[in-house]
Amino acid sequence: MACVAALPSARLGPTSSSIARNAVPSAVAARAGRPLQPAGAASRPRQQQRQQQQQQRQRGTLLVRALRNIDWPEALLFDCDGVLVDTEAEGHRVAFNAAFKRKGLDHEWSLDQYGVLLEIGGGKERMHHYFSSCADREPWASVTDPAARKAFLKELHELKTDIFNQLIETGALPVRPGVKRLINEAIDNGVKVAVCSTSNERAVSNIVKVMLGDRIAQHMRVFAGDCVPKKKPAPDIYNLAATELGVNPARCVVIEDSRIGLAAAKAAGMRCVVTESHYTKGEDFKIADAVFDCIGEAGDERFSLNDLTTPGSFWLNPPLPMDEDGNWVNPPARPAEFVDVDPL
């Protein structure tokens, strides 16, 4: 799907070499019996030609600037789990269950149960919600002090992260189709890339390094874990990414897979494309700019960097902050110059 707006081609005038070939020196004209022009008369057309050439070169430069700059977003921001890798069902869920078993806890999350728990952003928050729903069972039956519970969750989550990283390093969880292609397109065209996730920062960094490769890892910033006070659907992590990267939120495109991630991106005033994952198919994505089953590899791509351009991406919604119901809300505090305008 090609969405790039066509730009008018520049008509460049005669080159300086063609002008030189067509020019007749005054001395030759005199020998041919033609009258010489008054002093300065011959230079005036040449000055006009030079001015015309300069104007044409300027127009050509503007065209090149337009082709290079006007289209690309300033940044592509990716969620991790379910977007880069479909890690939830056979990655995080398996690691949580293994951690429970090692700690002697009689809990095992089924596929369906974990799908419901994914409505809670963050692993520690997810476990706290679940254990609180069955507080008469261990560990909450014996761990009752809030500070002790917090410490217990931290230790349990670190164990789970170790197990998850071991799964990642086996290569058992493949990268989703088209992820590397799209990220490399962005890097090749000077578009900043980052991953913004509620998962543990160590786990996310490991996914980027092990599964996406050294080149992408060198360019991709990681914002994850507890780097912000509120997790998705709050916009904090996307606000932080825009600030740290020095980019305009209105010119960022987020790739998400879940309703809470979509809500976070829209609350930050960013455009958002959803690529559905195992657990999120059928969720309400009405405020998304577009919804696909995946990004897609070359030859079978659902979209490319060209399709995320401005103004080429006419299918993208205005980058105004929305709530989960699609209602416009007051934008978060950001510099007044952060408006959605073309650079030319």
Image (cartoon, grey):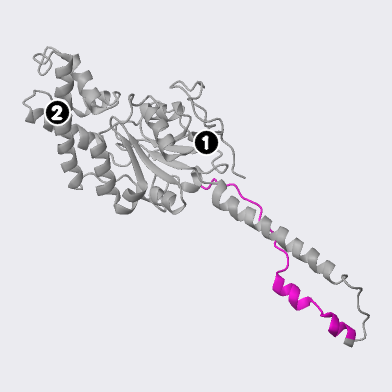
Mark nearest the camera among 1 and 2 is 2
| Three-letter amino acid code of the residue under disc 1 | Leu
* Residue 194 falls left or right of residue 23: left
Depth check, front residue: 154 or 177: 154
Q: Position of residue 47 (x, y in %)?
A: 79, 65
- Span of residues in magenta: 1-30
Residue 77's tag is none
Q: Which residue is mark 2?
A: 155
Q: Secondary structure at mark 2?
A: helix
Residue 316's tag is 1
User: Does residue 269 appear in this view?
Assistant: yes
* Residue 313 falls left or right of residue 186: right
Q: Looking at the rendering, in which quadrant would you find the C terminus?
A: top right
User: Does residue 274 appear in this view?
Assistant: no
Depth check, front residue: 43 or 237: 43
Q: Position of residue 37 (x, y in %)?
A: 91, 75
Residue 15 picture quarter:
bottom right
Residue found at the very far front of the displayed protein: 39
Depth check, front residue: 105 or 205: 205
The Cα atoms of the two marked residues, 1 and 2, are separated by: 43 Å
